[in-house]
Amino acid sequence: GLNDTGFEVAEQDWDRVVEVYTTKDKQLQVFNQEVTDQNAPNNALQWWKRDSEKIALGGAGIVTSAYDYARFLQMLLNNGELEGVRILGRKTVELLRRPLFEDFGDQSTAMGLSVWVLAEKENAYTQASVGSFGWGGYFYTSYWVDQEEKLVAVIMNQVSPTASSLNNDFVTLTYSALK
C-alpha cells in the first residue's frame, strides 16, 4: 500500500515532488545545479527523483510521501502489522527498536538497528517516552515512533543543509498537544 514510495519517480509524477532548498549564504534558496555541484558533484540535478541508477548518497535514495511514510511508521507502532496484515515479525520490530549501542549522540540516546532509541530520560531534554525511536533524512526529514503514547510523527522539510530548530520544535509542540 505504499504507492508513492520508491527509488525513482515516474516522469509523469515529477511535478508532485517538492523543491529541495538550502540555506546557502544564510538565505533560503532552491537546491539548484550550482549547489548540487558543490555538495554532490557526482550527481545530476534532481537525481534523487529521476534516475535510480545515480543514487550516490545512502540517506537520500528513497522518495516517498508523508502519507506513505506515516503508514510505514504505523506498521512499526503496531509491532509489524498494518490493517490486519503482518509485514514484519513482532520480534524483528522489537530488535529494531532495542538500544544496542550506547553513547550515540548523548547519554540518553542509543543506537538501534538504523534508528536512534531513547534509552533513558534522566539526561534527556525531551518529552518522548523511553523506548521511542526514530531517525532523520538527508533533506531534514525526521520521524519518530512512541509506543507508550501510541504516536507516530513525520515531518518532511526538504532543506539541506540547515541550522533550523524546526524538527525539535515539532517534537515539543506534538507532545505539548497531548492530553
Image (spheres, rainbow, N blue to C red):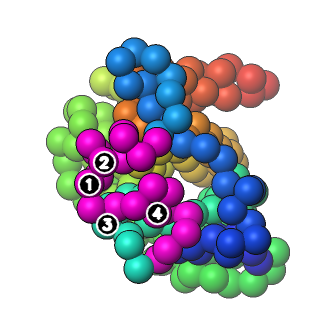
Secondary structure of residue under mark 4: helix
Image quadrant assignment for residue 90: bottom right
Q: Earlier in the sequence, mark 3 or mark 4?
A: 4
**Total labels drawn:** 4
Mark 2: give few (<14), some (14-19) or many (20+) Cα within 10 Å. few
Q: Is residue 26 left or right of residue 123?
A: right
- Residue 152 in the image, given as x and y percentages of width and height: 65, 48
Mark 3: few/some/many CA within 10 Å (<14, 14-19, 20+): some
Which of the two marks, 3 or 4, is nearer to us in this view?
Answer: 4
Between marks 1 and 2, how big is the CA–CA gap? 4 Å
Indicate which disc, 3 or 1, sits on the residue closer to the N terminus. Answer: 1
Residue at image coords 76%, 71%: 12
Q: Which mark is residue 56?
A: 3
Quadrant (top left/top right/bottom left/bottom right) for the N terminus = bottom right
Task: Look at discs 4 and 2 and give the one toward the viewer.
Answer: 2
The residue under the point 45% across, 32% down is 22
Disc 4 and disc 1: Cα gap in Å?
11 Å
Residues in magenta?
Answer: 32-52
Above-or-below relation of 79 to 19: below
Q: Which residue is mark 4?
A: 47
Q: Amino acid at mark 4?
A: Trp
Residue 72 falls in which quadrant of the image?
A: bottom right
Residue type at tag 1: Pro
Amino acid type of the residue that numbered disc 2 sits on in the rendered structure: Asp
Which of labels 3 and 2 is toward the front? 2
Instruction: Evaluate if marks 4 and 1 touch, with contact meaning CB atoms under 8 Å apart.
Output: no
C-alpha span from label 3 to label 2: 13 Å
Residue topped by disc 1: 41
Question: Mark 4: few, some, or many residues within 10 Å (few <14, many ≥20)?
Answer: some
